[in-house]
Amino acid sequence: MNSPFRDSRSILIIDDEEGIRYGLEKLFIREGYRVYSSGEYEGAIAITKKNKIDVALIDIRLKGKDDGISLLRELKDAEPEIIILIITGYGSIDSSVRAMKEGAADYILKPIDNAKLLDVVNKKVEIKSLRNENSYLKKTLLDSVFTYKFITDNSEVKDVLKVADKIKNTSASVFITGESGTGKEVLARYIHFTSNRGGGTFVGINCAALSDSLLLSELFGHEKGSFTGAIEQKIGKFELADLGTLFMDEIGDMSPDVQSKLLRVLEERSFERVGGIKKIQVDVRVIAATNRNMKELIKSGQFRQDLYYRLNVISCHLPPLRKRMEDIPLLLNHFLKQYNQRYNKNILGIHSELLERLVRYNWPGNVRELQNMINQAVLLCEGNEISSCNFQDSITPERFDIMNLTGKVKPLKSSIEEIVSYYEKQLISKVLSGNKHNRSKTANELEITRKTLARKIEKYNL
């Protein structure tokens, strides 16, 4: 697939010798470049103000100027990413070296070797294209896979983000707690990618998914031959995350043996690979997370208190989705856009009745469950609006939590009244819609009088 950054290449030639300009123009036109040229300083500036220039060839000596360095500086100020090559004679090499210190990419000696010049320019343009493409792919990857934008309108979560913003540019360890699916890894990525470590590597590991030996190897790496099956050297997560962030999920499931080794690494900021003797120094920000009760684990002796204090310099707790219901419409809209784009769909929204049911649902799987449901619904939806029929595992009455429907514990009678009212409203709304709001037909189908129907329509604001 062709890169979006290689479709168009432009070059500006600045030389006060008309013959050189003419020859270079022909050379780069044959190579497929868009070519601009000027014999003087002001003309070059005027061209760059009107056109996007990838490469500029500047003669070190221009009429009216001691050299081309002033022009180089001005072009760089206007377009920092521009590639500038200096054309010079043997007697001006010192000036050319000075130009490179000012930001020139290289210098070309006169008389100009066309083949060498083309090779230099093409390579510089290719490197720039690869850098741009890498930046583009990194952003795309962040947007589509490594999500770190925390979508919320909940005051408690906003307070958590405020704490994260205060400490993100430090090396302090962070301990994130919350139920499974509440967004602990998203918060960890937020801290990393918005911090001064954002240019470094974000590395994640699930401590509950591996045996002790495999976890040690994953964290610290191993030397070739250190154990059966170690056929080559392996770089561990700590080494990979140097100058970046290591996210350790399900830290509460880590065995005491691995805990002691982790504590030593955090204290010394160094470690040896499994089977190795060489000390490896690292600068890693550690973010740990768990959905378990750490106080109970410490009390029962399952987790080291000293390690907990090392990890829990800053603590952040994410409430479950059922306690931040105001976030559900925001998250629904976010995931709808995301999966519309992924599956090339154009679903405009969610049916109002379904939306109300989604807002009232207890969400035991939290945000992860919501995301999975919308992913499924977008795939199955054939129209432009999601309804309950688009869920393989529909939001049925059995999936509602009575506590959540009523908001708090109430007497059984009032709870039943609220639940009955909720489903009565849904039923009347559905039959009304099916009868195109013909009240007589609706009353007959529901086997109630028109007067009763009118009263309920007013009650439920239908």
Image: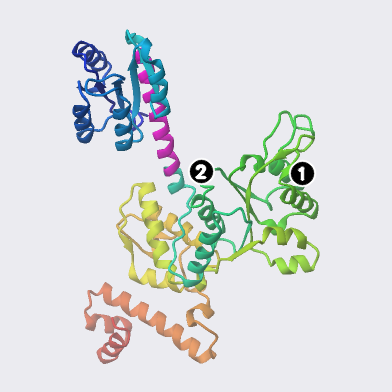
User: Looking at the figure, which quarter contains the C terminus?
Assistant: bottom left
Q: Position of residue 311 (x, y in %)?
A: 68, 58
Q: On the image, numbered disc 1 is attached to which residue?
A: 213
- For the stretch drawn in magenta, what is the main secondary structure? helix
Task: Locate residue 81 relative to residue 247 in the image: left or right.
Answer: left
The magenta segment? 117-139
Residues under numbered marks 1 and 2 in contact, where contact means CB atoms less than 8 Å apart? no
Q: Is residue 379 visible?
A: yes
Task: Locate residue 115 relative to residue 363 in the image: left or right.
Answer: left
Task: Locate residue 410 relative to residue 374 in the image: left or right.
Answer: right
Classed neighbour count for the residue bearing mark 1: other residues with Cα under 10 Å, few (<14), some (14–19), many (≥20): few
Q: Is residue 392 visible?
A: no
Which of pointers 1 and 2 lies earlier in the amino acid sequence? 2
In the displayed structure, 290 sits above or below 442; it is above
Work out how far the residue at label 1 is from the one at label 2, CA to CA, in angstroms: 31 Å
Residue 86's disc is none
Tag count: 2
Q: On the image, numbered disc 2 is attached to which residue?
A: 199
**Residue plotted at (25% across, 14% down):** 24
Local SS, label 2:
loop
- The colouring scheme, among rainbow, by chain, secondary structure or one colour, is rainbow
Query: Which residue is nearer to you in this view: 5 or 167?
Result: 167
Q: Position of residue 326 (x, y in %)?
A: 43, 71
The three-letter code of the residue at mark 1 reads Ser
